[in-house]
Structure formats: C-alpha cells, structure tokens
Amino acid sequence: MPTFTLGIEEEFQTIDPETRDLRSHMSQIVEGGKMILQEQVKAEMHQSVVEVGTTVCNNIEEARHQVTHLRRQVIELADRVGLKIAAAGTHPFSRWQDQPITVDARYDKIVEELQEAARSNLVFGMHVHVGVETRELGVYMMNALRYFLPHIFALSTNSPFWEGRETGYKSFRTKVFERFPRTGIPEHFGSASEYDAYINLLIKTGCIDNGKKIWWDLRLHPFFNTIEYRVCDMMLRVDEAVAMAALMQALVAKVYKLMISNLTFRQYRKALINENKWRAARYGLDGKLIDFGKQEELPTRNLIQELLDFVDDVLDELGSRHEVEYIHKMMEMGTGADRQLKVFRETGDLKKVVDFIVQETSHGL
C-alpha cells in the first residue's frame, strides 16, 4: 500500500484575554513564529486569524507530534504578546465588521472581487491533505470520497454561535462560507484531464487566476498530488484534530484497497450528498443522515459507526488504530458545538464559552 502522507493545517483565533473578543495579532505572532516555525505559520485574511501547518508527515504519529508542537508554539507566541488562542469554527460573539483585514495583495484582490462575502468570512477550519500517487488516482478519490464528507463534517461541527446569537446550527461556519463561489461538495469528474480542463477553462475566462480559488469541501490540490479535505470546522482539542485526520487518511487507504481489488461503490449525485451535508450542519451528531443505498434515514451516530467498521481493516497497516478509536470518545462526549452549547446553557454567558474554547484548545498539550 502507498504511504498516503499527511499534512494538517489549522486556523486559530487570537483572543483578547480581557474582553474575550477577537483581537488582531498585528502579525506579531506570525513574525515571532517565523523565527521558530519558518513557513509553518501564516497570516490569514482577517488579522485575528493565525494559520499553522505541518510539513509532509509519513504517518499519523508524525502528524500528531507536529500538530501538538505547533499548537504549543502558537499558544506560547500568543502569550508573549498578551493574547490567547482559541480553536473553534466561529467566535461566539465577535462581529466581522470590527475585525481588520490583513494588508496583502492577494487578500486585497479577493475582497475587491467578493466584497461583503469576503469581509464577513470570519470563519476557522481545519484542512487535511492526504498524498496520492497520481492526479488520475486523485480524481478517482475525489469522486469516491464525496459521499463520506457529511459524516466527517458531522463529527467536526464546532460553530453554533454567530455574532452573539445561538444560530440553531451545529456548524454555522459552512453557512457563512457558502457565500463564496466554488464551495461545497465537488462535482463528479470522469478523469484528471476533465478536471484539469475545467480548471483551465476558469483560468482562461478570467474566473480564477489559479486552481487554489476552488474552495470545495474536498479537492485534488492544483499544485500537489494530495487530496485536500476542507469540510471540517476547526477542532477544539488536538486529539480530535488528529483523530479526524486519521479517519480521512483511512478512507483514502480503504478506497484504494477496494480499487486495486476491482471493487467500487455507487456514485451519488451532488444534490443528494448535499441533503446529508445540510443535516450535518444543522444537527451535528444528533440528527439523522440518509443511507442512499437503503433509501432511508438513520441516526448519524449509527452511520458513523458503520464508517468506522468500513475502514477497520486498513488501520493496523496505517498504524492509526489508536487515533481512529478516539472517535468513539468524540461521539460519547459530543462535538465541539455540543460542548460549547452545554457551557452556554449552564452559564448564559458567551464569555464563559470563549474561556471554555481557550481551555480546550490547550487540552492534552
């Protein structure tokens, strides 16, 4: 079996410890971080976002080591400039109107083109790259893995609040991000050349300047041979982030194993997968998803258990059994959204929710 290398990117919130509001790090964290972390730390469009990313990891153990180290470093860097770090898909009460945009030609261009959709895009996600050997295999994976995106997404839901209101969604982050073009569940592509022709047509006609402006929930990366999962909210704990990355890698390995045995499974329309994605955003683990094979709705937790059974036979080869089994614990304790809502129900205070997020962000470091 190929290595299926891993890369994990996390977008953190920078928090004022007094007000608990988002506060610009004025690129101090990024500049300070460059000394220690080189290119592994980056500014994002809003100045209260800091992104860190691992290098290419050969297995989940390496990925865990790096993600833990990066979290620890970013928390220390923030401490030095009097800020806290929080890991959630949205901030419970900050208003995007109050958050300055990073001065950068790339971001200027996005804001000029997308206007309010870009300025209001104050959301935080986790992206996971899994290495594939060829672009042809990458497109095959993109087609096959689309079906599982709502299941993965339901586990990651961690953004129930927006601008001080309880939204009724377990993930409101996706609702905000959907205002961007070229987001959501990807289309089905017949081959790598069909996928590349689509990207080239968009570039030729001035829709995008490169393939990175395609912001789907899952994409074959335009420049690297990786499948990039972009569907997840930012996860509270490092253990949750690692467990999700291990599950995504296991799915790629399982689909590969089926493919080389000449086994495939049915492809479903984007419109059907979208029904499940909407349910995952609204209800997280507590709702039902549709099993399109059986044509019935079933509890989301049951379908996630089926998903864990589905990948079970590749875990030992990948060395990720321990990490994937943490997903049972996640189902037991509830998603980040469930835990945020619990704190809010108990205290009625969104500042206490921010304190909880900050505390969970350093859990297990």
Image: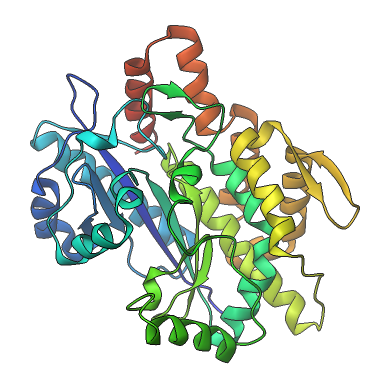
Q: Position of residue 166 (x, y in %)?
A: 48, 22
Q: Residue at x 42, y 40 (%)?
A: 89
Q: Residue at x 29, y 53 (%)?
A: 115
Q: Position of residue 92 (x, y in %)?
A: 37, 27
Decide which of 114, 277 is in the foreground and name it.
114
Q: Quadrant location of the N terminus?
A: bottom right
Q: Position of residue 190 (x, y in %)?
A: 67, 84
Judged from this view, the residue extending furthest toward the right is 294
Up/down of 83 relative to 174, above or below: above
Q: Please name the colour scheme applied to the rendered image.
A: rainbow
Judged from this view, the residue extending furthest toward the bottom is 193
Up/down of 8 relative to 17, above or below: below
Asked where in the image residue 38 lies, by quadrant, the reply is bottom left
Q: Is residue 128 visible?
A: yes
Q: Is residue 1 visible?
A: no
Up/down of 281 relative to 187, above or below: above
Q: Residue at x 49, y 30 (%)?
A: 160
Asked where in the image residue 124 lies, by quadrant, the reply is top left
Q: Quadrant location of the C terminus?
A: top left
Up/down of 250 relative to 30, above or below: below
Asked if residue 301 lies left or right of residue 237, the reply is right
Decide which of 38, 290 is in the foreground and name it.
290
Q: Residue at x 74, y 65 (%)?
A: 269
**Exactly how many numbered labels are in the figure?**
0
